Image (spheres, helix red, strand yellow):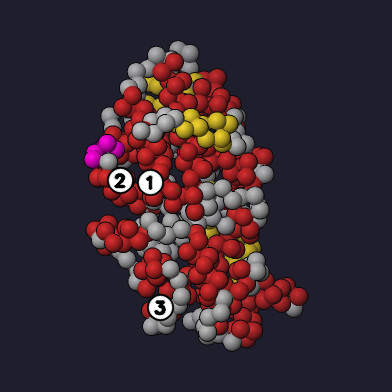
């Protein structure tokens, strides 16, 4: 028997858990692994306090799910004990498929495999272990349950996942612009034909939520220094993969070696149990330990990248509304080849171009709905009288260019 457990959370205070199945899931190794995966990947390179994990976030999101279900019950909606348990488990396990450094390596260790798909596989595996007791949670997670608002609370443009990570990431980074009053938003949630809606008086809280999300993306999630660190880490693993393919031996953990020695397709990953088990043994520590070993590698590219990454001598990252001019890029490439003595084929490890985009609010099927006192349901853009919401719905695209700082400065001074 599991007693009631009380967790002291820095965001919400005491979180009480008294469901035996949920306590067993929290104690399972698949979920405990989330303690070793940072919520914000490499944001600690910019914000030293950003050391919180996916474990913290999952518990916080489950707490918010518990709160919003209490509020809906208080408004007269019927929510059974089984539905509550299913919804809480669905949000508790929604990030269980994240690999090391969360989103940073999502398409590096696994080829075009989304963490949501891995979460689905792991939930199915847990369901076998718990003899079908996660059936309802999986239906909610996969949006197969008839009462659609349960899935909307797990995954939508205004869900408890986003409500928690905005507040939590704001707290740990110290970026106060991301703070939102989640309690008011949760209390403003209502239902209309089993769909999630926001009461009319919650419109300004909703707008504040969207604005906070926009600010957090450009100040934290897409910060240029974080992008620089992420691109370096990706190049380190790219180089390690290449060296393995060339038959070179590199020291790293067994699970990490499995994914570096060979690129596995989704079909292989979803059907070969040994690959899934190996993935559940991977976390941030495997990668850090490997980088510490590889800084002494005989390969000069891997050695340089690892040494500089560990010393926080990151690439410079230029972020702007237009790509870097071609002439500037060619000049930098020539400087890199000359300074590092590398070939054209090896340039891609030192010159990284790409783009990133963000829209705080996306119009489409998954829009936020508002309900007025007469019961009329309208889409947020129609309900809002602020031009800010129109602006937040526009996709902002920025181009980034990363390369060694010393080489970039050579071009600046010449």
Is disc 2 in contact with disc 3, using a CB cutoff of under 8 Å?
no
In the rendered image, residue 132 lying in the magenta stretch gets the answer: yes
| Prevailing SS of the magenta stretch | loop
Could you tell me residue 102's position as x and y percent?
48, 54
Q: Is residue 321 or residue 53 the one in the foreground? A: 53
Q: How many marks?
A: 3
Q: Report which residue position mark 1 lands on.
A: 28
Residue in view at x 41 percent, y 18 percent: 73
Q: Report which residue position mark 2 lands on.
A: 126
Q: Is residue 304 or residue 318 the one in the foreground? A: 304
Residue in view at x 41 percent, y 47 percent: 31
Give the answer, above or below, for where 60 lies relative to 330: above
Q: Nearer the viewer, mark 2 or mark 3?
A: 2
Which of the marked residues, 2 or 3, is nearer the chain's N terminus? 2
**Numbered disc 3: secondary structure:** helix
Residue in view at x 34 percent, y 71 percent: 262
Q: The magenta stretch spans which residues?
A: 131-135
Left or right: residue 229 versus residue 18 is right
Q: CA distance from mark 2 to mark 3?
A: 33 Å
Near mark 1 (Cα within 10 A), the count class, few <14, some 14-19 or many ≥20, is few
Could you tell me residue 13's position as x and y percent?
58, 31
Could you tell me residue 101's position as x and y percent?
50, 57
């Amino acid at each position: 028997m599991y007693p009631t457990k009380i967790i002291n959370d820095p965001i919400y205070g005491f979180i009480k858990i008294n469901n035996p199945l949920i306590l067993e899931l929290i104690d399972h190794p698949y979920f405990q692994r989330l303690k070793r995966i940072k919520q914000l990947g490499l944001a600690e390179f910019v914000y030293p306090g950003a050391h919180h994990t996916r474990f913290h976030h999952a518990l916080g999101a489950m707490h918010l799910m518990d709160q919003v279900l209490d509020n809906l019950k208080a408004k007269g909606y019927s929510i059974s004990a089984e539905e509550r348990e299913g919804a809480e488990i669905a949000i508790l396990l929604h990030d269980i498929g994240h690999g090391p450094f969360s989103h940073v390596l999502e398409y590096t260790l696994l080829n075009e495999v989304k963490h949501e798909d891995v979460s689905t596989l792991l939930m199915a595996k847990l369901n076998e272990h718990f003899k079908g007791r996660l059936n309802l949670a999986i239906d909610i997670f996969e949006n197969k349950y008839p009462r659609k608002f349960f899935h909307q609370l797990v995954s939508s443009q205004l869900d408890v996942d986003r409500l928690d990570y905005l507040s939590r990431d704001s707290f740990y980074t110290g970026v106060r612009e991301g703070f939102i009053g989640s309690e008011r938003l949760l209390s403003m949630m209502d239902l209309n034909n089993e769909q999630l809606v926001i009461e009319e008086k919650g419109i300004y809280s909703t707008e504040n939520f969207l604005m906070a999300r926009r600010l957090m993306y450009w100040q934290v999630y897409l910060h240029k220094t974080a992008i620089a660190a992420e691109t370096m880490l990706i190049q380190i693993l790219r180089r390690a993969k290449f060296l393995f393919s060339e038959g070179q031996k590199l020291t790293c953990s067994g699970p990490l070696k499995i994914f570096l020695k060979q690129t596995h397709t989704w079909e292989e990953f979803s059907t070969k149990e040994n690959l899934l088990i190996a993935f559940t043994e991977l976390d941030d520590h495997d990668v850090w330990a490997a980088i510490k070993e590889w800084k002494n590698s005989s390969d000069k590219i891997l050695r340089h990248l690892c040494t500089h990454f560990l010393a926080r001598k990151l690439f410079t990252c230029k972020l702007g509304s237009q790509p870097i001019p071609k002439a500037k890029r060619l000049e930098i490439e020539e400087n890199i080849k000359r300074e590092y003595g590398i070939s054209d084929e090896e340039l891609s490890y030192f010159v990284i171009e790409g783009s990133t985009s963000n829209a705080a609010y996306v119009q489409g099927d998954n829009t936020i709905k508002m309900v007025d006192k007469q019961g009329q349901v309208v889409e947020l853009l129609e309900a809002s009288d602020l031009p800010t919401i129109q602006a937040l719905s526009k996709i902002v695209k920025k181009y980034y260019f990363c390369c060694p700082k010393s080489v970039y400065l050579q071009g600046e001074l010449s």
